[in-house]
Amino acid sequence: MLALNILFTHCRSNMYLIIGICLGLSVSLLFAPVEINDCEDLSDPLPYPSSGQDYLDEYEPKINIKEKPQQAQKTPKAFVRPRYYSTELGIREKLFVGILTNRESLHSRGVALNKTISHLVDKVRFFISIPEGTKPNVSLPGIVGFTDTRNILKPFHVMKYISDNYLEDYDYYFLVKDSGFVNARRLKDLVEKLSVSADIHLGVNSEVENYCSLDAGILLSNSVVKELKKNLDWCVKNIYSDADDVNFGRCILHAIPVPCSNSAQGKKFISTILPASFNFDADFLEYTQQKDFVNSISVFPTDDHSIVYKMNAYFTSIELSAVQKEILELRKDILKTANFGPKNQRNVSWPVGNQPGNKAPGRFDILHWTYFNETHAFLENDFETLRELKGSAKDEIFQILNFAVGKVIGDSEGKLRFKNLINGYKKFDASRGMDYVLDLNFLSDSGREIKKRIEICKPLGKVEILPVPYVTENSRINMILIVDSMRKKETMKFLEDYAQTCLEKKEKIVLMMVLLYEPNSPSKGSEDTYFELKQYALSLTEKYKKDQAKVTWLSIRLPVSFTLIETEPLLKIAIADLSVRKFSPESLILFVEIGMEIRTDYLNRVRMNTINQWQVFSPIPFVEFHPDIIYKDNKITEFDVVRNLGRYDEYNFNSVAFYAKDYINTRKKIEGKILVVRTDKDISTILKIKNSTGSIFEMFVAFSELHSFRAVEPALKVRYKEINCNGTSNEDIFKKCKKQRNLQLGRRGELTKLILEYQSEL
């Protein structure tokens, strides 16, 4: 009874809520739409219609096979990754300098500007107007000639050339006439502080406002040059003034509304205009007192090219003083802050701020000090006890000695006089530079001897990447193999290796054998000394003729017999004269020797290190020791670069690579001393010369301006062969031959064991 009362009480309190819910449900049922299902089988769980009815689903995929398949209107291009990451990322160099000059002043003002700015900026080009069919009167790098001789159009020709060739390579372009001096260091500092995102049109106003003067120079950003490219045609058609400054400035303003200004982003472009009455000797000192002159980017006009060199010397001295001052400040800061570092790293190196030097990890890596006096160096290497100081080595010692003596006398205010050098020591550290220790003997005014020890350091400078011509690994190599009658078996083995390594793999290599005939040896028919070699060469040529590969030979009749070709360097030069002329001037020549292992890595390095009109290459091979000494129990193992099996033979110059044109030019220089061999009969004439130039590589070193590159080559391995030093009349060649033969026997440890074993058996 109590429960019913409680329920009735709750219902009465929520009466209005219940009535509202019921009323809402009734209204919703009254207005709900009525759907009639026509399906006969309501128990069918599938929502699909019967087979006799069409069912349309807007989400059902529709396949259109009419006029299919169709080809794409544009074939997508395969992505080719650029050779350099800077090209793909759009990284540009900073500064391009274009100098507007003429053919007559190239040898004077053009050369002066080239020598003073080319090493400081990224690219320099000289633009001249030259009639068709003529050539510049000086061999200056970077000359661009326009056959249109109208000087009024030269600035537009220059912009056309820049936009076609260097538009994507540089951030800023500086155009200037050759009528003045350009302070390249100040110009470079300016462009490095400017943002490449802004439109830059910097210079000094000409006679017309808003137009820059080409005599002072015009600095344009890459964005401005891109706009100029689009409007060059309009600029050429709308020339109205006789002044190229006005026409060029009007062209820039038409392309982009940025007038000429002498400042941008808080940086100023300062130029000094010299009066017509300027005299360098009388007036230059006065100009050096002016702040604007010291900070000038250009100084003009200067008709005398010698003034350019003098001004460059002045501005360079200012830069040098600033650098030295900065070095002193940095050294002071290093000394002040040295105590704030860890306890084990508080030692300050000497000179302060320089690399402290190499710390040897073991006793075998300790750097060697060389003792010297004023005339000789002692124990400079493991093979010489004494060497006379000559040439650059002697000049270096005296330069260091004079500097040390001058420093001591200067500090003593002239009270000491130099007497002699007691001891001298020098050491080269690849991580630091050259260190010297000098013990010097001085005399005082009273005649008393005073000894002082001076330590001098010549630190290494900043590492620079030298620009070299572009080379690839696709060059064709023309190998020349010299063959004598004593090594026909080894030559056959060389041809088999050549066929397997080069011909089978379709390498771009041509082999020419130089067959040396004795004075009375047969050279025709089956009795030919090299009959088997020639037949094998013909079979290889026939087998690989589809690949355009061939093995050729050149027959040379010697006037006398030779025991060893290597001991007669003039004979090798005579062979080179006769063989190189069989190739075109642009051919890459590689002299090889019998017994070498042909490796693709070595051939590719020859292609990369031999540069036309730039560099010759002579690798130092790894030569095998005597097999009876290094291979115990006559078990010959695989020949590898191991110290127990061989050594790098620095006396071996048999392998040398060069371009035929470079060889021909070098031979022309010494044709007066050594006759060029054109036929076999000329060999006897060249062999009568007593003063030998050495090997072919040494001939390039002595008489050519080409770079000579010689380094150890692990991929060039040469098997052991007997060296007979008899038969040569040159004493120096005989000594080198004996040393080479002795070093090729084996390691000193192995030779010592043999001697001890031999002594024990006696």
Image (tube, grey):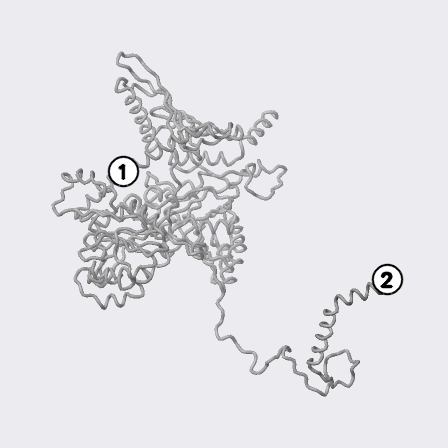
- Residue 680 percent coordinates (x, y): 36, 51
Residue 2: which disc?
A: 2
485 shown above or below 353: below
Residue 618 lies, with reference to residue 197, above or below; the image says above
SS for tag 2? helix
Mark 2 neighbour density, 10 Å: few (under 14) some (14–19) many (20 or more): few
Q: Nearer the viewer, residue 575 or 157?
A: 157
Badge 1 is on which residue? 318
| Cα distance between the residues tagged 2 and 1 | 113 Å
Q: Amino acid at mark 1?
A: Ile
Place residue 22 in its image quadrant.
bottom right
**Relative to residue 589, is residue 144 drawn left or right?**
left
Quadrant showing the N terminus? bottom right
Q: Position of residue 255 (x, y in %)?
A: 29, 63
Give amino acid for label 2: Leu
- Mark positioned earlier in the residue sequence (2 or 1): 2
Whether residue 377 is visible: yes
Query: With 297 as the anchor, is 733 left or right in this view?
Result: right
The spot of residue 124 in percent (x, y) is 30, 52
Q: Is residue 283 above or below residue 63?
A: above
Residue depicted at 55% across the width and 31% down the height: 751
* Residue nearer the viewer, 474 or 164: 164
> Is residue 9 or residue 494 the one in the foreground?
9
Residues 130 and 319: in front is 319
Tell me the SS state at disc 1.
helix
Quarter that holds the C terminus? top right
